[in-house]
Image (spheres, grey):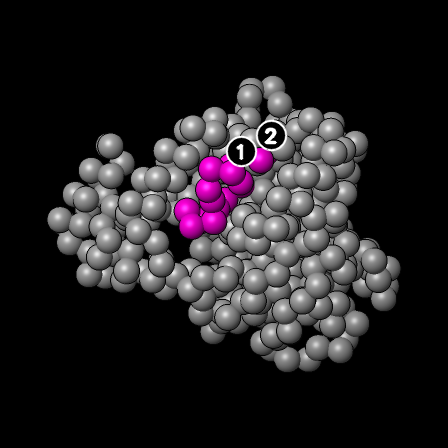
Amino acid sequence: MTKKVALINPGRGGRFDAHEPLQLGFIASSLIEKGVEVKIIDEVAGDNVELGIKDYKPDIAGITATTPFVEHAYRHADFCRQQGVLTVLGGVHATVMTEEALRHADIVVKGEGEQAMLDIVSGGAREKVITRDYIRDLDTLPPPAYQLMNMDFYLNARERAPYNTALIFVPKGYKVASMLTGRGCPYSCIFCHNTWRGMPFRFNSPERVVRDMKYLIDTYKTQAIAFFDDDFFANKERAKKIFQLIREDNLGIIWGCNCRVNTIDEQILKEAFQAGCRQIAFGFESGSQKMLDIMQKRTKVEENKKAVELCKEAGIICVAFFILGLPHETKADIQLTRKFIME
């Protein structure tokens, strides 16, 4: 494989969000492993996409399309096609809005992109819409290609994005990196892309997680890590093994993650804190039990309240996310959510 591939991360850096394009990083490392020349052009980190394409002259451009920045993605896709570059769109928005995305791309990848991009580069994929089987064993994937990213930009994300809710736990001046150690979710909330995509729940082994943490610490002097798994504690035995290995190896790092309220208890939070956990984000979604049931959250309002109390007792920052405006929500439901937040 001698083709050159550009992977484009559209968007803009802001005060609310700034973390590495991990999915592009996984695709990049999978291509590099097969001898493909790859460049990540990262608009969020300040790269000029058009200049980057003109300078690099790739054979193939892979662009991630998420809803907040889909206009950026489509504009870059149109430009790449004008330059004669085979243009591929992927990501959640392109997966959902396939026909729309095809108006701007030669190929749309639905779902995970590692194997699909390998097939495109090798010439083995000729479909306009490509879907490949989900990768069952995530340990078979190489780590994301952090070396292709603007790590100076992302390591200082706490300063650049002071309102990023994933980084509240990070002291100013700390170098912070991001990791993704699982894909999919074992639950079926109606609003989540994991549900309708049928994405199976998979995760890296504890040993692989800690090995990748060590790489970030040794290579970039990382002092904090934000895990972007949908539910870091979904498999409690795995989580506890990760905590054990962090303590045994004395990594001396702090970290934050996302969890569901029904995967925590006093003991696991105690062990997590001892291993460096300083923040957990929960999708409480609503203070109305009616709305939680409609969303098929399989949680109770009282469980959400208990999660806040448990985190406080453990010394862990609790971050809460809510959804407003779903069908069937009334003013009374919104008032219940407001009451929950104020309490």
Quadrant housing the N terminus:
bottom right
**Residue topped by disc 1:** 270
Depth check: 49 or 18 in front?
18
Is residue 45 one of those drawn in magenta? no
Element type at mark 2: helix
Per the rendered image, the range of residues in magenta is 255-271
Mark 1 and 2 residues: CB-CB less than 8 Å, in contact?
Answer: yes
Q: Amino acid at mark 1?
A: Lys
Q: How many marks?
A: 2
Image point 31% across, 60% down: which residue? Answer: 295
Q: Residue type at mark 2? A: Gln
- The residue that disc 2 covers is 274
Residue 117 found in image quarter: bottom right
The residue positioned 41% from the left and 35% from the top of the image is: 310
Looking at the image, is 296 positioned above or below residue 248? below
Image location of residue 259, percent across then percent down:
48, 46
In the image, is 52 to the left or to the right of 281? right
SS type, badge 1: helix
The answer to whether one can see residue 13 in this image is no
Residue at coordinates 53% horizontally, 33% vertically from top-left? 270
Question: Relative to the observer, which residue lies in front, 116 or 103?
Answer: 116
Instruction: Check the image and name the residue furthest to the bottom.
Output: 127
What residue is drawn where x is 54% and y is 48%?
233
Q: Position of residue 337 (x, y in %)?
A: 23, 43
User: Does the segment drawn in magenta span residue 264?
Assistant: yes
